[in-house]
Image: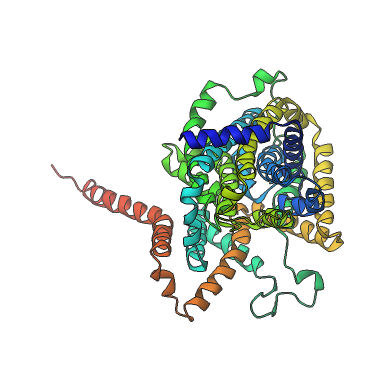
Amino acid sequence: MMEILNNLVMGFGVALTPTNLLIALVGCLVGTAVGVLPGLGPTATISLLLPISVYLDRTSALILLSGIYYGAMYGGSITSILVKIPGEAASVITCIDGYQMARRGRAGAALGISALASFAAGIVATIGIAALGPTIAGLALMFGPVEKSALLILGFALVLGIGDGPKIRALAMIGFGLLLATVGVDLVSGEERFVFDVPALRDGFGIAIVAMGLFGISEVLLMAEGGDEAGRPMAYGRRLSDLLPNGDDIRQAAGPVARGSLLGFFLGLLPGGGALISSFASYMMERRLSKTPERFGQGAIEGVAGPEAANNAGAQASFIPLLCLGIPANAVIGVIMGALLMAGVTPGPRLIVEHPDLFWGVIASMFVGNLMLVVLNVPLVGLFVALLRVPAAVMAVLIVFFCVIGAYSLNNSLFDVGAMLCFGILGYGLRRGGFDVAPLLLAFVLGGMLEQNLRQGLIIGYGDARVFLSSPISAAFLALAVVVALGPVLLALAKRGRRSPDTASSPGRSD
Protein backbone atom coordinates (compact mmCIF):
# COMPACT_ATOMS: atom_id res chain seq x y z
CA MET A 1 0.00 0.00 0.00
CA MET A 2 2.81 2.43 0.88
CA GLU A 3 4.45 1.72 -2.44
CA ILE A 4 1.21 2.61 -4.28
CA LEU A 5 0.89 5.86 -2.28
CA ASN A 6 4.50 6.78 -3.03
CA ASN A 7 3.93 6.10 -6.72
CA LEU A 8 0.77 8.23 -6.70
CA VAL A 9 2.69 11.08 -5.06
CA MET A 10 5.19 10.81 -7.90
CA GLY A 11 2.31 10.75 -10.39
CA PHE A 12 0.73 13.88 -8.94
CA GLY A 13 4.11 15.57 -9.21
CA VAL A 14 3.90 14.92 -12.96
CA ALA A 15 0.19 15.65 -13.42
CA LEU A 16 0.14 18.90 -11.42
CA THR A 17 2.77 20.68 -13.46
CA PRO A 18 1.29 23.80 -15.15
CA THR A 19 1.73 22.30 -18.62
CA ASN A 20 0.01 19.03 -17.82
CA LEU A 21 -2.79 20.80 -15.92
CA LEU A 22 -3.48 22.92 -18.99
CA ILE A 23 -3.34 19.87 -21.26
CA ALA A 24 -5.74 17.95 -18.98
CA LEU A 25 -8.15 20.91 -19.06
CA VAL A 26 -7.97 21.07 -22.87
CA GLY A 27 -8.59 17.31 -23.10
CA CYS A 28 -11.62 17.53 -20.79
CA LEU A 29 -13.08 20.49 -22.73
CA VAL A 30 -12.55 18.83 -26.11
CA GLY A 31 -13.93 15.53 -24.80
CA THR A 32 -17.07 17.21 -23.46
CA ALA A 33 -17.60 18.97 -26.80
CA VAL A 34 -17.06 15.70 -28.64
CA GLY A 35 -19.68 14.02 -26.46
CA VAL A 36 -22.19 16.83 -26.96
CA LEU A 37 -21.89 17.26 -30.72
CA PRO A 38 -23.59 14.46 -32.69
CA GLY A 39 -21.52 12.83 -35.38
CA LEU A 40 -18.18 13.41 -33.70
CA GLY A 41 -16.75 10.72 -31.47
CA PRO A 42 -13.63 10.10 -29.42
CA THR A 43 -12.24 7.68 -32.02
CA ALA A 44 -12.41 10.18 -34.89
CA THR A 45 -11.32 13.12 -32.73
CA ILE A 46 -8.32 11.33 -31.25
CA SER A 47 -7.33 10.15 -34.73
CA LEU A 48 -7.41 13.76 -35.96
CA LEU A 49 -5.29 14.90 -33.01
CA LEU A 50 -2.61 12.24 -33.41
CA PRO A 51 -0.32 14.54 -35.47
CA ILE A 52 -0.55 17.17 -32.70
CA SER A 53 0.23 14.63 -29.98
CA VAL A 54 3.57 13.89 -31.68
CA TYR A 55 4.78 17.38 -30.72
CA LEU A 56 3.89 16.85 -27.05
CA ASP A 57 5.79 15.02 -24.36
CA ARG A 58 4.60 11.38 -24.35
CA THR A 59 3.06 11.73 -20.89
CA SER A 60 1.32 14.97 -21.88
CA ALA A 61 0.06 13.36 -25.09
CA LEU A 62 -1.50 10.44 -23.20
CA ILE A 63 -3.05 12.84 -20.66
CA LEU A 64 -4.63 14.80 -23.52
CA LEU A 65 -6.02 11.76 -25.34
CA SER A 66 -7.29 10.03 -22.21
CA GLY A 67 -9.00 13.26 -21.12
CA ILE A 68 -10.81 13.41 -24.45
CA TYR A 69 -11.98 9.82 -24.03
CA TYR A 70 -13.50 9.98 -20.57
CA GLY A 71 -14.58 13.60 -21.14
CA ALA A 72 -16.72 12.36 -24.02
CA MET A 73 -18.47 10.01 -21.59
CA TYR A 74 -19.48 13.08 -19.55
CA GLY A 75 -20.59 15.12 -22.57
CA GLY A 76 -22.55 12.33 -24.24
CA SER A 77 -25.25 12.49 -21.57
CA ILE A 78 -26.08 16.17 -22.13
CA THR A 79 -27.82 15.85 -25.50
CA SER A 80 -29.22 12.45 -24.47
CA ILE A 81 -31.08 14.12 -21.60
CA LEU A 82 -32.04 17.39 -23.27
CA VAL A 83 -33.02 16.38 -26.81
CA LYS A 84 -32.82 12.55 -26.81
CA ILE A 85 -29.84 12.42 -29.16
CA PRO A 86 -27.09 10.16 -27.77
CA GLY A 87 -23.77 11.92 -28.16
CA GLU A 88 -22.07 8.52 -27.76
CA ALA A 89 -23.26 4.95 -28.27
CA ALA A 90 -22.76 4.39 -24.53
CA SER A 91 -25.26 7.21 -23.85
CA VAL A 92 -28.17 5.47 -25.59
CA ILE A 93 -29.38 4.09 -22.26
CA THR A 94 -29.36 7.57 -20.71
CA CYS A 95 -31.90 8.66 -23.33
CA ILE A 96 -34.52 6.32 -21.88
CA ASP A 97 -34.96 7.80 -18.39
CA GLY A 98 -32.93 10.99 -18.71
CA TYR A 99 -35.17 12.40 -21.43
CA GLN A 100 -38.28 11.41 -19.50
CA MET A 101 -36.92 13.30 -16.49
CA ALA A 102 -36.40 16.33 -18.73
CA ARG A 103 -40.00 16.09 -19.97
CA ARG A 104 -41.13 16.28 -16.36
CA GLY A 105 -39.09 19.41 -15.74
CA ARG A 106 -36.21 17.60 -14.03
CA ALA A 107 -33.53 18.04 -16.68
CA GLY A 108 -31.28 19.80 -14.16
CA ALA A 109 -31.49 16.93 -11.69
CA ALA A 110 -30.74 14.42 -14.48
CA LEU A 111 -27.74 16.42 -15.69
CA GLY A 112 -26.46 16.95 -12.15
CA ILE A 113 -26.78 13.27 -11.22
CA SER A 114 -25.10 12.33 -14.50
CA ALA A 115 -22.10 14.57 -13.74
CA LEU A 116 -21.83 13.47 -10.10
CA ALA A 117 -22.22 9.77 -11.00
CA SER A 118 -19.53 10.06 -13.68
CA PHE A 119 -17.23 11.82 -11.21
CA ALA A 120 -17.73 9.19 -8.49
CA ALA A 121 -17.24 6.37 -10.99
CA GLY A 122 -14.13 8.02 -12.40
CA ILE A 123 -12.58 8.26 -8.94
CA VAL A 124 -13.49 4.62 -8.16
CA ALA A 125 -12.05 3.44 -11.49
CA THR A 126 -8.87 5.46 -11.03
CA ILE A 127 -8.35 4.03 -7.55
CA GLY A 128 -8.96 0.57 -9.01
CA ILE A 129 -6.39 1.16 -11.75
CA ALA A 130 -3.81 2.30 -9.19
CA ALA A 131 -4.45 -0.47 -6.68
CA LEU A 132 -5.44 -3.47 -8.78
CA GLY A 133 -4.56 -2.69 -12.38
CA PRO A 134 -1.27 -4.57 -12.79
CA THR A 135 -2.60 -7.48 -10.71
CA ILE A 136 -5.88 -8.14 -12.52
CA ALA A 137 -4.85 -7.06 -15.99
CA GLY A 138 -4.25 -10.74 -16.75
CA LEU A 139 -8.01 -11.14 -17.09
CA ALA A 140 -7.75 -9.60 -20.54
CA LEU A 141 -5.34 -12.35 -21.65
CA MET A 142 -8.02 -14.94 -20.92
CA PHE A 143 -10.38 -13.41 -23.51
CA GLY A 144 -10.10 -14.63 -27.07
CA PRO A 145 -12.77 -14.65 -29.82
CA VAL A 146 -14.67 -17.48 -28.09
CA GLU A 147 -14.97 -15.63 -24.78
CA LYS A 148 -15.73 -12.31 -26.49
CA SER A 149 -18.55 -13.95 -28.46
CA ALA A 150 -20.11 -15.32 -25.27
CA LEU A 151 -19.83 -11.89 -23.61
CA LEU A 152 -21.55 -10.24 -26.57
CA ILE A 153 -24.32 -12.87 -26.53
CA LEU A 154 -24.85 -11.96 -22.88
CA GLY A 155 -25.04 -8.37 -24.06
CA PHE A 156 -27.84 -9.28 -26.46
CA ALA A 157 -29.69 -11.03 -23.65
CA LEU A 158 -29.47 -7.80 -21.65
CA VAL A 159 -30.70 -5.77 -24.63
CA LEU A 160 -33.80 -7.95 -24.73
CA GLY A 161 -34.85 -6.58 -21.35
CA ILE A 162 -34.50 -2.93 -22.37
CA GLY A 163 -37.52 -0.93 -23.44
CA ASP A 164 -41.22 -1.17 -22.91
CA GLY A 165 -43.85 -3.34 -24.49
CA PRO A 166 -43.96 -7.03 -25.43
CA LYS A 167 -40.63 -8.83 -25.70
CA ILE A 168 -41.53 -9.98 -29.20
CA ARG A 169 -41.19 -6.36 -30.31
CA ALA A 170 -37.75 -6.11 -28.68
CA LEU A 171 -36.77 -9.33 -30.49
CA ALA A 172 -37.96 -7.84 -33.78
CA MET A 173 -35.86 -4.71 -33.17
CA ILE A 174 -32.81 -6.82 -32.28
CA GLY A 175 -33.25 -8.81 -35.51
CA PHE A 176 -33.57 -5.61 -37.51
CA GLY A 177 -30.44 -4.19 -35.87
CA LEU A 178 -28.48 -7.34 -36.68
CA LEU A 179 -29.66 -7.12 -40.30
CA LEU A 180 -28.46 -3.52 -40.57
CA ALA A 181 -25.09 -4.55 -39.10
CA THR A 182 -24.49 -6.95 -42.02
CA VAL A 183 -24.65 -4.19 -44.65
CA GLY A 184 -21.26 -3.71 -46.30
CA VAL A 185 -18.28 -5.84 -47.32
CA ASP A 186 -17.76 -9.06 -45.40
CA LEU A 187 -14.32 -8.84 -43.80
CA VAL A 188 -13.71 -12.59 -44.09
CA SER A 189 -14.86 -13.44 -47.62
CA GLY A 190 -14.73 -9.96 -49.19
CA GLU A 191 -18.27 -10.40 -50.53
CA GLU A 192 -20.62 -7.43 -50.70
CA ARG A 193 -23.84 -7.80 -48.68
CA PHE A 194 -26.95 -5.68 -49.23
CA VAL A 195 -24.88 -3.08 -51.07
CA PHE A 196 -27.01 -3.04 -54.25
CA ASP A 197 -24.11 -1.58 -56.26
CA VAL A 198 -24.07 1.58 -54.13
CA PRO A 199 -20.38 2.35 -53.40
CA ALA A 200 -21.23 4.36 -50.28
CA LEU A 201 -22.76 1.25 -48.67
CA ARG A 202 -19.59 -0.84 -48.89
CA ASP A 203 -18.45 0.39 -45.48
CA GLY A 204 -21.90 -0.10 -43.96
CA PHE A 205 -23.80 2.48 -41.93
CA GLY A 206 -22.03 4.56 -39.29
CA ILE A 207 -23.22 4.35 -35.70
CA ALA A 208 -23.67 8.11 -35.54
CA ILE A 209 -25.83 8.11 -38.70
CA VAL A 210 -28.18 5.49 -37.30
CA ALA A 211 -28.31 7.05 -33.82
CA MET A 212 -29.01 10.60 -35.01
CA GLY A 213 -31.74 9.39 -37.35
CA LEU A 214 -33.50 6.98 -35.01
CA PHE A 215 -33.44 9.35 -32.04
CA GLY A 216 -32.88 12.94 -33.21
CA ILE A 217 -34.79 13.24 -36.48
CA SER A 218 -37.62 10.98 -35.32
CA GLU A 219 -38.01 13.17 -32.21
CA VAL A 220 -38.33 16.25 -34.42
CA LEU A 221 -41.00 14.52 -36.49
CA LEU A 222 -42.92 13.58 -33.35
CA MET A 223 -42.66 17.19 -32.14
CA ALA A 224 -43.99 18.43 -35.48
CA GLU A 225 -46.87 15.96 -35.32
CA GLY A 226 -47.85 17.17 -31.84
CA GLY A 227 -48.17 20.76 -32.99
CA ASP A 228 -47.54 22.15 -29.49
CA GLU A 229 -45.01 21.97 -26.68
CA ALA A 230 -46.90 19.44 -24.57
CA GLY A 231 -44.45 16.65 -25.32
CA ARG A 232 -41.29 18.76 -25.03
CA PRO A 233 -38.95 18.74 -22.06
CA MET A 234 -39.79 21.47 -19.57
CA ALA A 235 -37.40 23.90 -17.86
CA TYR A 236 -38.32 24.53 -14.22
CA GLY A 237 -36.47 26.99 -12.03
CA ARG A 238 -33.78 29.50 -12.86
CA ARG A 239 -31.52 29.33 -9.82
CA LEU A 240 -28.84 26.65 -9.89
CA SER A 241 -29.88 25.44 -6.43
CA ASP A 242 -33.39 24.73 -7.77
CA LEU A 243 -32.04 22.73 -10.70
CA LEU A 244 -29.51 20.46 -9.02
CA PRO A 245 -30.43 17.07 -7.49
CA ASN A 246 -31.95 17.22 -4.02
CA GLY A 247 -31.22 14.99 -1.03
CA ASP A 248 -33.78 12.36 -2.06
CA ASP A 249 -32.27 12.18 -5.56
CA ILE A 250 -28.78 11.65 -4.16
CA ARG A 251 -30.00 8.95 -1.74
CA GLN A 252 -31.80 7.11 -4.55
CA ALA A 253 -28.76 7.38 -6.82
CA ALA A 254 -26.09 6.37 -4.30
CA GLY A 255 -26.63 2.62 -4.61
CA PRO A 256 -26.84 2.58 -8.43
CA VAL A 257 -23.70 4.73 -8.66
CA ALA A 258 -21.73 2.37 -6.39
CA ARG A 259 -22.94 -0.75 -8.22
CA GLY A 260 -22.49 0.83 -11.65
CA SER A 261 -18.95 1.94 -10.83
CA LEU A 262 -17.87 -1.55 -9.78
CA LEU A 263 -19.68 -3.27 -12.67
CA GLY A 264 -18.29 -0.81 -15.21
CA PHE A 265 -14.77 -1.18 -13.85
CA PHE A 266 -14.68 -4.97 -14.21
CA LEU A 267 -16.47 -5.03 -17.58
CA GLY A 268 -14.11 -2.32 -18.81
CA LEU A 269 -11.19 -4.68 -18.23
CA LEU A 270 -12.57 -7.17 -20.73
CA PRO A 271 -11.92 -6.80 -24.46
CA GLY A 272 -15.33 -6.40 -26.08
CA GLY A 273 -16.85 -5.08 -22.85
CA GLY A 274 -16.18 -1.42 -22.26
CA ALA A 275 -18.54 1.49 -21.74
CA LEU A 276 -21.39 0.31 -23.97
CA ILE A 277 -22.07 -3.11 -22.42
CA SER A 278 -21.34 -1.65 -18.97
CA SER A 279 -24.05 0.99 -19.33
CA PHE A 280 -26.94 -1.26 -20.29
CA ALA A 281 -25.77 -4.06 -17.97
CA SER A 282 -26.04 -1.52 -15.14
CA TYR A 283 -29.47 -0.40 -16.35
CA MET A 284 -30.81 -3.94 -16.38
CA MET A 285 -29.30 -4.68 -12.98
CA GLU A 286 -30.97 -1.63 -11.43
CA ARG A 287 -34.26 -2.48 -13.07
CA ARG A 288 -34.15 -6.02 -11.69
CA LEU A 289 -33.13 -4.86 -8.20
CA SER A 290 -35.76 -2.14 -8.01
CA LYS A 291 -38.92 -2.70 -5.97
CA THR A 292 -40.77 -0.56 -8.53
CA PRO A 293 -39.35 -1.59 -11.94
CA GLU A 294 -42.34 -0.02 -13.69
CA ARG A 295 -40.75 3.41 -13.03
CA PHE A 296 -37.90 2.63 -15.42
CA GLY A 297 -38.58 4.20 -18.78
CA GLN A 298 -40.76 6.82 -17.09
CA GLY A 299 -38.01 8.96 -15.56
CA ALA A 300 -36.35 6.86 -12.85
CA ILE A 301 -33.23 8.62 -11.58
CA GLU A 302 -31.60 5.22 -10.99
CA GLY A 303 -31.82 4.66 -14.76
CA VAL A 304 -29.55 7.66 -15.25
CA ALA A 305 -27.17 7.29 -12.29
CA GLY A 306 -26.23 3.62 -12.75
CA PRO A 307 -25.50 3.64 -16.52
CA GLU A 308 -23.63 6.97 -16.36
CA ALA A 309 -21.42 5.64 -13.58
CA ALA A 310 -20.87 2.37 -15.44
CA ASN A 311 -19.92 3.87 -18.79
CA ASN A 312 -17.39 6.26 -17.25
CA ALA A 313 -15.85 3.54 -15.07
CA GLY A 314 -15.73 1.20 -18.07
CA ALA A 315 -14.02 3.82 -20.24
CA GLN A 316 -11.26 4.43 -17.69
CA ALA A 317 -10.81 0.76 -16.77
CA SER A 318 -10.13 -0.04 -20.43
CA PHE A 319 -6.74 1.66 -19.99
CA ILE A 320 -5.56 -1.25 -17.80
CA PRO A 321 -5.25 -3.84 -20.61
CA LEU A 322 -3.52 -1.20 -22.74
CA LEU A 323 -0.96 0.01 -20.22
CA CYS A 324 -0.30 -3.31 -18.46
CA LEU A 325 -0.62 -5.80 -21.33
CA GLY A 326 -0.47 -3.84 -24.57
CA ILE A 327 -3.98 -5.03 -25.53
CA PRO A 328 -6.45 -2.42 -26.84
CA ALA A 329 -9.90 -3.18 -25.41
CA ASN A 330 -11.78 -1.11 -28.02
CA ALA A 331 -11.29 1.12 -31.05
CA VAL A 332 -10.60 4.28 -29.05
CA ILE A 333 -7.93 2.56 -26.96
CA GLY A 334 -6.47 1.15 -30.18
CA VAL A 335 -5.94 4.69 -31.51
CA ILE A 336 -4.39 5.77 -28.20
CA MET A 337 -2.08 2.74 -28.42
CA GLY A 338 -1.01 4.02 -31.83
CA ALA A 339 -0.12 7.37 -30.24
CA LEU A 340 2.05 5.61 -27.65
CA LEU A 341 3.87 3.61 -30.32
CA MET A 342 4.45 6.81 -32.32
CA ALA A 343 6.01 8.29 -29.16
CA GLY A 344 8.38 5.33 -28.88
CA VAL A 345 6.61 3.70 -25.93
CA THR A 346 5.65 0.03 -26.16
CA PRO A 347 2.62 -0.71 -23.95
CA GLY A 348 2.88 -3.89 -21.94
CA PRO A 349 4.10 -5.43 -18.69
CA ARG A 350 7.43 -3.54 -18.85
CA LEU A 351 5.81 -0.10 -19.17
CA ILE A 352 5.41 0.40 -15.40
CA VAL A 353 9.09 -0.41 -14.83
CA GLU A 354 10.53 1.45 -17.81
CA HIS A 355 8.21 4.49 -17.77
CA PRO A 356 6.85 4.87 -14.23
CA ASP A 357 6.42 8.64 -14.69
CA LEU A 358 4.09 8.02 -17.64
CA PHE A 359 2.01 5.29 -15.97
CA TRP A 360 1.53 7.01 -12.62
CA GLY A 361 1.35 10.48 -14.17
CA VAL A 362 -1.60 9.44 -16.36
CA ILE A 363 -3.36 7.78 -13.41
CA ALA A 364 -2.93 10.92 -11.29
CA SER A 365 -4.20 13.04 -14.19
CA MET A 366 -7.42 11.00 -14.17
CA PHE A 367 -8.09 12.20 -10.62
CA VAL A 368 -7.42 15.76 -11.75
CA GLY A 369 -9.43 15.40 -14.98
CA ASN A 370 -12.51 13.99 -13.27
CA LEU A 371 -12.43 16.85 -10.76
CA MET A 372 -12.14 19.34 -13.62
CA LEU A 373 -15.08 17.78 -15.42
CA VAL A 374 -17.44 17.90 -12.45
CA VAL A 375 -16.38 21.51 -11.69
CA LEU A 376 -17.02 22.44 -15.33
CA ASN A 377 -20.28 20.56 -15.83
CA VAL A 378 -22.25 21.12 -12.61
CA PRO A 379 -22.18 24.96 -12.72
CA LEU A 380 -23.23 24.82 -16.38
CA VAL A 381 -26.39 22.82 -15.62
CA GLY A 382 -28.40 26.05 -15.53
CA LEU A 383 -27.12 27.03 -18.98
CA PHE A 384 -27.94 23.60 -20.42
CA VAL A 385 -31.45 23.65 -18.94
CA ALA A 386 -32.00 27.15 -20.35
CA LEU A 387 -31.82 25.60 -23.81
CA LEU A 388 -35.17 23.96 -23.09
CA ARG A 389 -36.79 27.41 -23.01
CA VAL A 390 -36.06 27.80 -26.72
CA PRO A 391 -39.37 27.68 -28.68
CA ALA A 392 -40.24 24.29 -30.14
CA ALA A 393 -39.98 25.48 -33.75
CA VAL A 394 -36.49 26.89 -33.19
CA MET A 395 -35.38 23.81 -31.21
CA ALA A 396 -36.54 21.50 -34.02
CA VAL A 397 -34.55 23.49 -36.58
CA LEU A 398 -31.45 23.42 -34.36
CA ILE A 399 -31.70 19.66 -33.85
CA VAL A 400 -32.00 19.04 -37.59
CA PHE A 401 -29.15 21.47 -38.27
CA PHE A 402 -26.72 19.78 -35.88
CA CYS A 403 -27.74 16.32 -37.07
CA VAL A 404 -27.16 17.26 -40.72
CA ILE A 405 -23.81 18.90 -39.94
CA GLY A 406 -22.80 15.91 -37.83
CA ALA A 407 -23.78 13.41 -40.52
CA TYR A 408 -22.01 15.33 -43.29
CA SER A 409 -18.83 15.84 -41.27
CA LEU A 410 -18.23 12.09 -40.89
CA ASN A 411 -17.23 11.48 -44.52
CA ASN A 412 -18.13 14.78 -46.24
CA SER A 413 -20.89 12.82 -47.94
CA LEU A 414 -24.45 13.86 -48.78
CA PHE A 415 -25.30 10.17 -48.91
CA ASP A 416 -24.76 9.99 -45.14
CA VAL A 417 -27.14 12.93 -44.68
CA GLY A 418 -29.78 11.18 -46.78
CA ALA A 419 -29.27 7.91 -44.90
CA MET A 420 -29.69 9.73 -41.57
CA LEU A 421 -32.95 11.31 -42.75
CA CYS A 422 -34.19 7.89 -43.89
CA PHE A 423 -33.38 6.42 -40.49
CA GLY A 424 -35.26 9.35 -38.98
CA ILE A 425 -38.38 8.51 -40.96
CA LEU A 426 -37.94 4.84 -40.08
CA GLY A 427 -37.54 5.69 -36.38
CA TYR A 428 -40.65 7.88 -36.50
CA GLY A 429 -42.69 5.06 -38.03
CA LEU A 430 -41.42 2.51 -35.52
CA ARG A 431 -42.09 4.76 -32.55
CA ARG A 432 -45.57 5.59 -33.83
CA GLY A 433 -46.17 1.86 -34.12
CA GLY A 434 -45.20 1.30 -30.48
CA PHE A 435 -41.70 -0.09 -31.07
CA ASP A 436 -38.74 0.99 -28.93
CA VAL A 437 -35.76 1.89 -31.13
CA ALA A 438 -33.14 1.54 -28.36
CA PRO A 439 -32.80 -2.28 -28.78
CA LEU A 440 -32.41 -1.74 -32.55
CA LEU A 441 -29.48 0.65 -32.12
CA LEU A 442 -27.79 -1.46 -29.44
CA ALA A 443 -28.11 -4.61 -31.56
CA PHE A 444 -26.68 -2.71 -34.54
CA VAL A 445 -23.65 -1.63 -32.48
CA LEU A 446 -23.05 -5.12 -31.06
CA GLY A 447 -23.88 -6.99 -34.26
CA GLY A 448 -20.64 -6.29 -36.11
CA MET A 449 -18.50 -7.23 -33.12
CA LEU A 450 -20.49 -10.42 -32.55
CA GLU A 451 -20.22 -11.54 -36.17
CA GLN A 452 -16.47 -10.98 -36.28
CA ASN A 453 -15.73 -12.80 -33.02
CA LEU A 454 -18.26 -15.57 -33.72
CA ARG A 455 -16.65 -16.41 -37.05
CA GLN A 456 -13.16 -16.26 -35.57
CA GLY A 457 -14.29 -18.60 -32.81
CA LEU A 458 -15.73 -21.04 -35.32
CA ILE A 459 -12.48 -20.94 -37.30
CA ILE A 460 -10.59 -21.79 -34.08
CA GLY A 461 -13.00 -24.69 -33.47
CA TYR A 462 -12.83 -25.87 -37.11
CA GLY A 463 -16.53 -25.16 -37.55
CA ASP A 464 -17.62 -26.99 -34.41
CA ALA A 465 -19.96 -24.79 -32.33
CA ARG A 466 -19.08 -26.81 -29.23
CA VAL A 467 -15.91 -24.71 -29.01
CA PHE A 468 -18.03 -22.06 -27.27
CA LEU A 469 -18.69 -24.53 -24.44
CA SER A 470 -15.08 -25.67 -24.16
CA SER A 471 -13.96 -22.55 -22.32
CA PRO A 472 -15.21 -22.21 -18.71
CA ILE A 473 -15.49 -18.43 -19.12
CA SER A 474 -17.47 -18.75 -22.34
CA ALA A 475 -19.74 -21.44 -20.88
CA ALA A 476 -20.40 -19.29 -17.80
CA PHE A 477 -21.34 -16.26 -19.91
CA LEU A 478 -23.64 -18.35 -22.12
CA ALA A 479 -25.34 -19.88 -19.08
CA LEU A 480 -25.82 -16.40 -17.63
CA ALA A 481 -27.26 -15.21 -20.96
CA VAL A 482 -29.83 -18.04 -20.86
CA VAL A 483 -30.78 -17.11 -17.30
CA VAL A 484 -31.11 -13.43 -18.18
CA ALA A 485 -33.17 -14.12 -21.31
CA LEU A 486 -35.44 -16.86 -19.98
CA GLY A 487 -35.52 -15.98 -16.28
CA PRO A 488 -38.43 -13.49 -16.50
CA VAL A 489 -40.44 -15.93 -18.64
CA LEU A 490 -39.92 -18.81 -16.22
CA LEU A 491 -40.82 -16.60 -13.26
CA ALA A 492 -44.01 -15.47 -14.97
CA LEU A 493 -44.98 -19.08 -15.74
CA ALA A 494 -44.26 -20.08 -12.14
CA LYS A 495 -46.45 -17.28 -10.80
CA ARG A 496 -49.24 -18.23 -13.20
CA GLY A 497 -48.94 -21.86 -12.10
CA ARG A 498 -49.22 -20.89 -8.43
CA ARG A 499 -52.30 -18.78 -9.11
CA SER A 500 -54.17 -21.33 -11.24
CA PRO A 501 -55.09 -23.82 -8.43
CA ASP A 502 -56.48 -20.96 -6.32
CA THR A 503 -58.58 -19.58 -9.15
CA ALA A 504 -59.82 -23.08 -9.99
CA SER A 505 -60.97 -23.86 -6.44
CA SER A 506 -62.54 -20.51 -5.50
CA PRO A 507 -65.68 -20.44 -7.73
CA GLY A 508 -67.07 -23.85 -6.83
CA ARG A 509 -67.62 -23.32 -3.12
CA SER A 510 -70.77 -25.12 -1.75
CA ASP A 511 -72.56 -24.84 1.57
Q: Which residue is at a point 53% across and 21% down the rendered structure image?
A: 247
Give the answer, above or below, for where 434 lies relative to 478: above
Residue in the foreground of this view, choosing between 278 and 383: 278
As drawn, is 8 to the left or to the right of 40?
left
Q: Quadrant of the C terminus?
A: top left
Q: Position of residue 28 (x, y in %)?
A: 72, 38
As drawn, is 145 to the left or to the right of 219?
left
Q: Quadrant of residue 195?
A: bottom right
Q: Which residue is at a point 76% across and 77% down the rendered structure image?
A: 196
Q: Position of residue 245 (x, y in %)?
A: 59, 25
Residue in the foreground of this view, choosing between 76 and 129: 129
Give the answer, above or below, for where 493 lies relative to 233: below
User: Does residue 322 appear in this view?
Assistant: yes
Q: Quadrant of the N terminus?
A: top left
Q: Which residue is at a point 65% across and 43% down the rendered structure image?
A: 70
Q: Position of residue 69 (x, y in %)?
A: 68, 46
Q: Which residue is at a point 43% across and 64% down the rendered structure image?
A: 474
Q: Quadrant of residue 465?
A: bottom left
Q: Position of residue 36 (x, y in %)?
A: 74, 42
User: Does residue 101 appear in this view?
Assistant: no
